[in-house]
Image (cartoon, grey):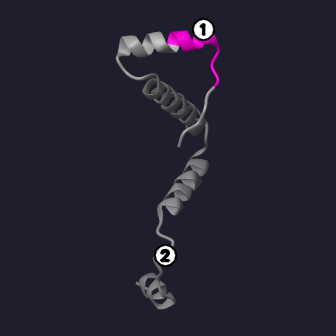
Amino acid sequence: MKQFVDLDKTTLMKLKLISTIEKVSSDDLIQKIVESYVENVWLKKFSGLTDEEKEDLGLLMLMQEADRNDKVSREEIFSILSK
């Protein structure tokens, strides 16, 4: 997904200089910077959660990965629960 970011002249100049030194394109550098920032914010927020909140978040993430078209019959559920 492409997004536009407005940068002032000084920041843009610094970005171009860093991208030249690192030998990567400005777009790749911006993507790495944003990914790093998001990861740091995520880790800060995650470390502040209680164990119960972490568990809820983990379950939510697993539910988002689940295939919604995969169906299980009622009989299968009850046969597994009865074991």
Principal secondary structure, stretch drawn in magenta:
helix
> Disc 1 vs disc 2: Cβ atoms closer than 8 Å?
no
Q: Amino acid at mark 1?
A: Thr
Where 46 sits versus 64, above or below? above
Specify the label residue 69 is tagged with: 2
Q: Residue at x 34, y 17 (%)?
A: 23
Q: Residue 40 in the image: x percent, y percent?
A: 53, 29
Q: Looking at the figure, which quarter contains the C terminus?
A: bottom left
- Which residue extends farthest bottom? 75
Amino acid type, label 2: Asn
Q: Which residues are magenta?
A: 6-14
Name which residue lies at 47% across and 27% down: 27
Q: Which residue is mark 1?
A: 10
Q: Residues within 10 Å of mark 2 (few under 14, many from 20)?
A: few
Q: Position of residue 38 (x, y in %)?
A: 54, 33
Q: Quadrant of residue 80?
A: bottom left
| Disc nearest the viewer among 1 and 2 | 1
Q: Name the side, left or right, on which 40 lies relative to 9.
A: left
Local secondary structure at mark 1: helix
Instruction: Give me the residue at 58% from left, 36% from top.
Output: 3
SS for dot 2 = loop
Q: Nearer the viewer, residue 19 or 55?
A: 19
Residue 12 within the magenta-colored segment of the rendering: yes
User: In the picture, residue 10 is in which quadrant?
Assistant: top right
**Looking at the image, is mark 1 or mark 2 earlier in the sequence?**
1
Q: Spatial distance from mark 1 to mark 2, Cα to Cα?
A: 51 Å
